[in-house]
Amino acid sequence: MSEFPKQTEVVVIGAGIAGTMTAYQLAKRGVPTVLCEKGRVAGEQSSRNWGWVRKQGRDHREIPAIIESLRIWEGLEKEIETDVGWHQAGTLYIAKTDDDLAYYEEWLGHARDYQLDSRMLSPDEVDDLTGGEGRKWKGGLYTPSDGRAEPAKAAPAVAKAVERLGGTVLTECAVRTVESAAGKVSGVVTEKGAIACQAVVCAAGAWSSFFSGNLGHAFPQLKVKASVLRTKPAPLISQTSIGSPGASLRRRQDGGYTIARSGSSYFQITPDAFRYFREFLPALQTSMKPRLRIGAEFFKELMRPRSWSGDDVTEFEKTRVLDPVPDPGTLREVLAAAQENFPQLGSLEIAETWAGMIEVTPDAIPVWSGVDDLEGYYIATGFSGHGFGMGAATGLIMSELVTGGKSRFDLEPFRLSRFTDGSKLELNAR
Ligand SMILES: Cc1cc2nc3c(=O)[nH]c(=O)nc-3n(C[C@H](O)[C@H](O)[C@H](O)COP(=O)(O)OP(=O)(O)OC[C@H]3O[C@@H](n4cnc5c(N)ncnc54)[C@H](O)[C@@H]3O)c2cc1C
């Protein structure tokens, strides 16, 4: 771990993929940067995700940024001279019904607008790609240039690259609050002391709204619990990441598969769920269709203070790593679906199960934004279950915002004020 610095130019809060990539891009530009992580690098979502890095199925507003993100991922291992498990073998969504096919065809319209290599596959082509037989599927949507990386490797490797470039990475170092003078960021207070700085990027994942709320910049953000399993080594049926009914599979570097199911997440009913009910209602009625669950989290979050000072021991130190318990029933169903859909896998054995807390916004697209009335405070969050692939672009965008006040991408749809300025939110229907 690096020495504790008294001052820097930029403090990045949170060493997930968003924070490490932001610190990396800043360090590459020679900007003195300190990355503070309350627990361990990639302890939360960024090591717990499926590892898909995909353009396929993205909301149309995210497509320009994800194209650039893929470009950065493609060159990352060479650039940082470290293995992150990068493999470019595409994404396949299998269609079981005509409705699935129609849904994928509709998305292809967006793909064509951006000249993506996405295309529909016939039942035979799906069999060829997955080692299956019998044409049991209606077809599929396929994007060969999509990729994947190993979540356990990526953010830690990028954090090491930050240090090699002269940046500082502090773990077990929660940022408690941000200090300001005359409406501008002047520093942060961490559990280990104060750091003077001119800018702060909050990339705190599921904690971003809670942290920002203490500064008067809360925004609608809720948590969804998603369970995942990995198998012991199993026959290679495809290098392509496959979404199939009831089970999504990604080939791992260790010869197993990471398997989970899209749409199997549980919305945690927390006090914020009531606080932001109005903002989330349209999404809950249409695209998200979540299963709801109330648990111990509700009461824990109800009891926690919503404002604090730099002298207080905060929730960030009390919960070093959000480590929810996976849902065994869901994972049993997921494994059964994988076996039924792909008998060519043989008998799969579970090596490990885990869960992650996904942070979502009401329109399920990210926040890449400054805030009103606090110059130098920026937020990168709200990736709504697809921010690993977008991590590389997030680093680029946030470094551009911090150093030049604007990005090469149109950030209007991603501004924080969309939640408060009376605009009608366009839901991400994907
Ligand atoms: C089960 C699952 C499957 C997923 N699958 C995919 C996928 O295949 N592809 C994809 O693109 N995305 C996927 N995602 C989403 C993706 O993982 C996230 O969008 C992405 O990792 C978010 O990165 P992040 O850096 O914003 O947040 P995180 O990785 O959650 O990191 C935030 C960090 O901030 C730290 N922190 C919080 N508050 C403080 C503080 N005050 N001080 C210091 N540190 C603090 C936390 O400890 C944490 O380490 C999945 C997510 C899950 C859970």
Image (spheres, grey):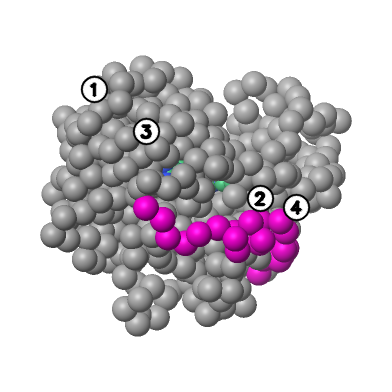
* Identity of the residue drawn at 46% across and 37% down: 38
- The residues tagged by marks 2 and 4 sit, at their Cα atoms, a distance apart of 14 Å
Q: Could you tell whether 234 is left or right of 216 in the image? A: right
Image x and y of residue 67, in percent: 36, 47
* Mark 1 sits near ligand 1, with its Cβ under 8 Å away: no
> Which is more N-terminal, label 3 or label 1?
1
Q: Which mark is residue 286?
A: none
Q: Nearer the viewer, mark 2 or mark 4?
A: 2
Tell me if residue 293 is in the magenta stretch.
yes
SS assignment at label 3: loop
Q: To which residue does mark 4 refer?
A: 246
Q: Residue furthest front?
A: 311
What's the magenta region?
Answer: 289-309
> Which is more N-terminal, label 4 or label 2?
2
* Mark 2 sits near ligand 1, with its Cβ under 8 Å away: yes
Image x and y of residue 220, in percent: 46, 67
- The residues tagged by marks 4 and 3 sit, at their Cα atoms, a distance apart of 46 Å
Circles 1 and 3, Cβ within 8 Å, touching? The answer is no
> Quadrant location of the C terminus?
bottom right
Q: Could you tell whether 29 is left or right of 176 in the image? A: left
What amino acid is at disc 4? Gly
Q: To which residue does mark 3 refer?
A: 192
Q: To which residue does mark 1 refer?
A: 166
Circles 2 and 1, Cβ within 8 Å, touching? The answer is no
SS assignment at label 4: loop
Q: Nearer the viewer, mark 4 or mark 3?
A: 3
